[in-house]
Amino acid sequence: MSVPDELDRLWTPHRMAYINDNDRREESYDQPAGCPFCLAPTRDDADGLVVARGKSVFAVLNLYPYNPGHLMVCPYRHVADYTDLDEAETVELARFTQTAMRVVRRVSGAHGFNLGMNQGAVAGAGIAAHLHQHVVPRWGGDTNFMPVVGRTKVLPQLLGDTRKLLAERWREVEAEHA
């Protein structure tokens, strides 16, 4: 089997801000003082884009989302690997992921989700030093001509507005599933 000379590529130039920022600060991510996932919960929820807080994990909006409502569930503890989580962290991370899905479905009617963790830089983790689970809402037809042809991702809502809406619904959903 031969490899074609020209492969199809999907260009995502909107992600360059994230990549460039990561290159500039990669070394600091190894230390909690420079880690954005350690810093986010120390800020006001609106400033840190924190949607909900638990005992050992929190939910935060992705600063460079793939889709509107793209959340991440992170332990407060600065750990890199899923196997480093203790039992309480593992259980709460799973429950927060379930709640995130319920909340996003209620707020925006997501048809499906991509869930995942990129473990290590070679696996695609932009911030490999601090574990985080992605919760990416998906809708039928959510990949349209704008990112493909226009090289632009259309996000119809500001991050602060999305955070406020999700945070309000989070409490409702938690109460229903307690």
Image (cartoon, grey):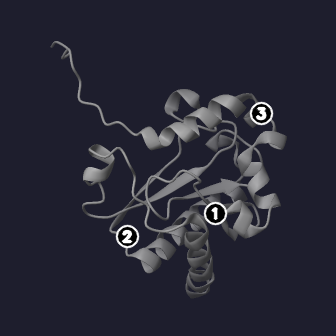
Kind of residue sitting beneath label 3 = Ser
Q: Residue at x 71, y 50 (%)?
A: 37
Label 3, on which residue?
Answer: 28
Location of residue 51 in the rendering, given as x and y in whole percent from the top left corner: 64, 69
Query: For numbered disc 2, what is the local secondary structure?
Result: loop
Q: Is residue 10 above or below residue 173?
A: above
Nearer to me, 56 or 45? 45
| Mark identifier at residue 110 | 2
Q: Is residue 108 left or right of residue 41?
A: left
Asked if one can make out residue 178 in the rendered structure from this viewpoint, the answer is: no
Q: Is residue 3 above or below residue 28?
A: above
Q: Is residue 103 above or below residue 19?
A: below
Location of residue 95 in the rendering, given as x and y in whole percent from the top left corner: 58, 67
Distance between the alpha carbons at the discs numbered 1 and 2? 18 Å
In the rendered image, which quarter contains the N terminus?
A: top left
Q: Is residue 65 above or below residue 171?
A: above
Q: Nearer the viewer, mark 3 or mark 1?
A: 3
Kind of residue sitting beneath label 2 = Ala
Kind of residue sitting beneath label 1 = Ala
Query: For numbered disc 1, what is the local secondary structure?
Result: strand
| Mark identifier at residue 59 | 1
Distance between the alpha carbons at the discs numbered 3 and 1? 22 Å
Q: Earlier in the sequence, mark 1 or mark 2?
A: 1
Q: Is residue 8 left or right of residue 85?
A: left
Q: Residue at x 52, y 53 (%)?
A: 134
Q: Nearer the viewer, mark 3 or mark 2?
A: 3
Q: Residue at x 43, y 38 (%)?
A: 13
Location of residue 168 in the rendering, given as x and y in whole percent from the top left corner: 61, 82
Quadrant in the rendering for residue 131: top right
